Image (spheres, rainbow, N blue to C red):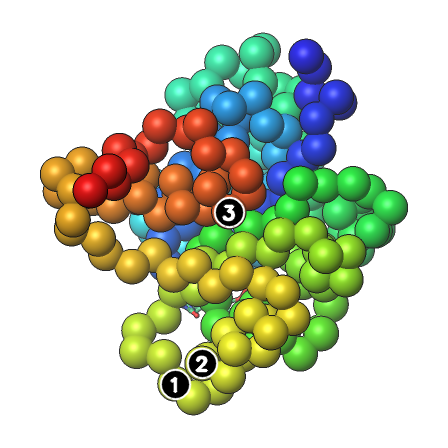
Amino acid sequence: MNSSEKLPTVVGITGATGSILGFRLVKALLQLDEPVDLVISSSSYPVITQEMSLSLPGPAEQRDAILEYLELDVSRYQDWLTCHSNKQLGASPASGTYLTRGMVVIPCSMTTLGKMASGVSDNLVCRAADVTLKERRPLIVIPRESPFNLIHLENMTRLHQAGGVILPPVLSFYQEAFNSIDGQINYTIGKVLDHLGLTEHGLFPRWSG
Ligand SMILES: Cc1cc2nc3c(=O)[nH]c(=O)nc-3n(C[C@H](O)[C@H](O)[C@H](O)COP(=O)(O)O)c2cc1C
């Protein structure tokens, strides 16, 4: 099967701490042979540099750099990853006629959360999220802030009421597999994949009682 035969997942990485979560989701999706439309907000770039020691080129040149960072074979995956500028409001994920499996905003800053909750679609991440909700496709939001203030909580409630899934990267300790940072990341990414209906990820053992 080639990439055009499957519905892509839109992944938005915004400028909250934890950019690695977004990149690990992209890797997991690609390894499941799921195509990805990636949008990185402009505020994310300094965070990515700070946290991942990765200096990314602009969207037109970043695909191969991301695949190399993720230790994925560029020739194998180049057709499966499409990178868009957040300013490009005419890109494919901005229209409901472009079919997708759904969208994940990971990590989601409180800025992007607030815009999505109030229907402000002035960049591609927010427009694609708005489209995902109106088309009744899965929108999974991984908010990152601590503690949350009332505005954050109300924005999350509003998105939930509009059909989004609020899936914060909360620590879990009930399985041995979670006993490392890597295990915690796998737990959150696995939960996201579950909500996209991609349950065969093997990122954590299922609780069997
Ligand atoms: C190193 C760093 C870490 C940040 N972490 C967070 C965070 O965890 N949550 C958050 O809401 N904003 C965080 N911010 C602030 C956002 O980057 C800022 O609010 C920005 O407007 C987000 O824009 P965006 O949603 O378009 O990416 C952080 C900024 C920097 C530089």
Q: Is residue 22 visible?
A: no
- Is 2 displayed left or right of 168 in the figure? right
Q: Which residue carries the number 1 mark?
A: 149
Question: Percent x, y for residue 25?
Answer: 46, 39
Q: Quadrant of the C terminus?
A: top left
Would you name the residue on which mark 2 appears? 153
| Residue neighbourhood size for the residue with mark 3, other residues' Cα within 10 Å, grouped as few (<14), some (14–19), many (≥20) | some
The quadrant in which the N terminus is found is top right
**Residue type (three-letter) at the residue carrying disc 1:** Asn
Does residue 168 appear in this view? yes
Q: As drawn, is 169 to the left or to the right of 194?
A: left
Tell me the mark number nearer the camera, choosing from 1 and 3: 3
Q: Is mark 3 within 8 Å of ligand 1?
A: no
Q: Which residue is mark 3?
A: 195
Vertical placement of residue 204 versus 141, above or below: above
Answer yes or no: do the residues labelled 1 and 3 have beta carbons within 8 Å?
A: no
Residues at circles 2 and 1 in contact by the CB criterion of under 8 Å:
yes
> Quadrant location of residue 149?
bottom left
Say which element carries label 2: helix
Vertical placement of 101 versus 145: above or below?
Answer: above
